[in-house]
Image (cartoon, rainbow, N blue to C red):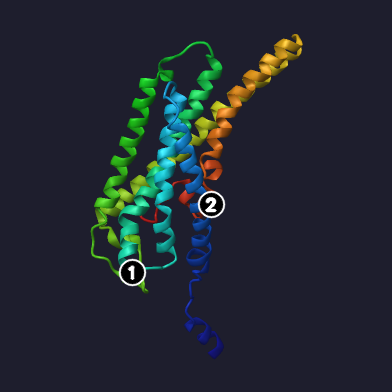
Amino acid sequence: MNGSQSNLSLKCVRDTSVTAVVFPCLYSALFLFALVLNCLAAWIFFNIRSTTTFVVYLKNVVVADLLMTLSIPVKVLADADVGSWRLRVFYCRYSAVLFYTTMYISILLLGLISLDRYLKIVRPFGKCALQRVGLGQALSAAVWAVMVSLALPNAVLSDRTPLLSGGRLKCTSLKGQAGMLWHEGFNYFCQVVFWGTLALMLLCYTFISRKVYESYKASRSGSKAASRRTKAKVFVVGVPEKIDCHTQPQAPPPGRFGVAHGNLHSAGDTTDGT
């Protein structure tokens, strides 16, 4: 009886070694790797003229990824409890908002890239309205405007006096009721963005794969010259996609969308501070 009472009196201590040690180390390595590759990608793509919607979208993805990469050091210091509580406040109000906003901007832009590649395969010798450079720039600007306008209240509404709980500041303690409601709604919106874009990418690349396979089968019945031309076309279509994949070094989102973020962040839960 006394043993059971003593067991009940024991307090459950939360193990923070993973979030305070392992994740900061992984994010630190990720930051160095991502910074080098994103700077290289920026140098390459911004020396290319924006003559196609594909290049327009890629340039915007590079900018979003670079901004997200630059916000990683603050996340590392905040998660590792290095620095004063003011650093944690800065992370909750501003840095985390920037991190997740740019992540979902990149996700939406990747969805536009997949749609652009699909249209390029379906109509290789003609252009529809969605393949016009001007419209591509307008869509990119709209993505930035919508995401920033929806994420900005998360920073504005985190205006409460910081309260330390157990020696650690929780981001939710900075939000009032209005801030929590907006935060919850924004999380649902981000999940719609994630799963909707994922579905669009799967659909587009499924059709692209089928077209490439049909082209390959048709080439087998033709001459060797026709076969070589078909293979060259497949290569030209595939290379930009590989460039795109290798210029997105931000580890988190699974397949570019997230598992490395841990918890539910990859699927749209931005409870950290956005």
Query: What amino acid does circle 1 point to?
Result: Ser
Q: Position of residue 107 (x, y in %)?
A: 45, 38
Q: Is residue 33 above or below residue 123?
A: below
Q: Neighbour class for label 1 at 10 Å: few (<14), some, many (≥20)? A: few
Q: Residue furthest bottom?
A: 2
Q: Residue furthest top?
A: 223
Q: Position of residue 1 (x, y in %)?
A: 55, 89
Task: Answer yes or no: is residue 182 visible.
Answer: yes
Label 1 secondary element: loop
Residue in the foreground of this view, choosing between 1 and 137: 137
Q: Position of residue 120 (x, y in %)?
A: 52, 19
Residue in the foreground of this view, choosing between 63 and 12: 63
User: In this image, 53 relative to 213: left or right?
Assistant: left
Q: Is residue 232 above or below residue 257?
A: above
Indicate which disc residue 40 carries: none
Tell me what residue is drawn at x 39 percent, y 55 percent.
271
Who comes first in sequence, dot 2 or dot 1? 1
Tell me what residue is drawn at x 39 percent, y 58 percent.
74
Label 2 secondary element: helix
Q: Which quadrant of the figure has residue 166?
A: bottom left
Q: Which residue is mark 1?
A: 84
Task: Answer yes or no: is residue 274 visible.
Answer: no
Q: Is residue 121 above or below residue 113?
A: above
Tell me what residue is drawn at x 49 percent, y 11 percent.
126
Indicate which disc residue 260 carries: 2
Q: Neighbour class for label 2 at 10 Å: few (<14), some, many (≥20)? A: some
Query: What amino acid does circle 2 point to?
Result: Ala
Q: Position of residue 225 (x, y in %)?
A: 72, 11
Alpha-carbon span between mark 2 and mark 1: 27 Å
Q: Which quadrant of the figure has residue 62?
A: top left
